[in-house]
Image: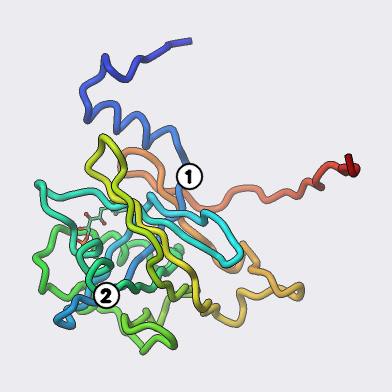
Amino acid sequence: MPTILVETLAPREAYRLFVSLVIPRPIGWVSTLGADGTRNLAPFSFFNAVGGPPPTVMVSIGRRRGQEKDTLRNLRERGEGVVHLVDEHLVAAANLTSGEWEYHLDEFALAGLATIPSTLVAPPRLRDAAAAMECRVTQIIPVDGTEYTLVLGRVLCFHLRDELLAADGLVDARALRPVARLGRDEYTTLGEIFALARPVSYPR
Ligand SMILES: Cc1cc2nc3c(=O)[nH]c(=O)nc-3n(C[C@H](O)[C@H](O)[C@H](O)COP(=O)(O)O)c2cc1C
């Protein structure tokens, strides 16, 4: 069983190993607006639910050649964003929006994605995404020793396509068809779904 000390690896290799191990990662596709109204859309797989209630999500955003990425700039400037869940239907478009485009390049137009106004926040949301969460930024936290910045956001509103909702009011995973990120250039779809009852716990 290889034991690999991180300090023996080149930083880039340690990172590549890490992101091939911590899998599958859901992909949050984040729509933001800059102070000057510039629209932005980009995918992030350092994305997850981190707590609640109220429902709270995170994205962790690296730097590009030492500069802040446009999403982080906009989240600082306006404090709002819409996080869409990437599904099988939209993953190619999400990948297209991950290009290193200059700030004023409109990724919605580039990928041919229609938008509609959000309900509670200024950034628009994707008309054809199966699920979206309108969010307000609550914390922006530098990740010590890395070039990453963790952004936490409170979910103010869910938009779910009708067929996503099961009879119990929860999302039907099969209907959502989420795509998740693996290492390398790899992605995955849902495999087998199974249920496990939580152990019965007794009051102490
Ligand atoms: C599936 C996928 C997941 C990604 N996840 C992240 C991530 O978690 N953090 C990050 O900084 N960049 C991530 N990227 C790269 C960004 O999407 C890319 O740097 C993008 O240009 C940022 O856009 P922006 O400058 O408009 O914010 C990911 C790219 C892809 C295709």
How many residues crowd around disc 1 within 10 Å: few (fewer than 14), some, or many (20 or more)?
Answer: some
Judge by depth and name the residue closer to the eye, 186 or 197.
197
Vertical position of residue 6 compared to residue 141: above or below: above
Amino acid bearing label 1:
Pro
Residues tagged 2 and 1 counted as in contact (Cβ below 8 A): no
| Quadrant housing residue 73 | bottom left
| Of residues 173 and 156, the one drawn nearer to the viewer in this rendering | 156
Residue 109 in picture, x, y percent from top left: 20, 79
Find residue 196 and name its label: none
The amino acid pointed to by label 2 is Arg
List the single residue furthest toward the front.
204
> Dot 2 corresponds to which residue?
78
Question: Does residue 157 sit above or below 188 in this rendering?
Answer: below
Residue under circle 1? Answer: 24
What color scheme is it? rainbow
- Nearest to the eye among marks 2 and 1: give it: 2
Question: Would residue 115 be found to the left or right of residue 161 on screen?
Answer: left
The crowd level at tag 2 (other Cα within 10 Å; few <14, some 14-19, many 20+) is some
Q: Residue at 37% of width from left, 79% of height from top?
A: 126
Location of residue 138 in the rendering, given as x and y in whole percent from the top left corner: 40, 65
- Give the CA distance from mark 2 to mark 1: 30 Å
Residue 176 is situated, as x and y percent measured from the top left of the image, at 55, 67
Where in the image, quadrant-wise, is ligand 1 located?
bottom left
Q: Is residue 204 left or right of residue 59?
A: right
Q: Residue at x 42, y 56 (%)?
A: 58
Position of 73 with respect to 53 (left or right) is: left
Q: Quadrant of residue 120?
A: bottom left
In percent of the image, x 32 and y 62: which residue is there?
A: 92
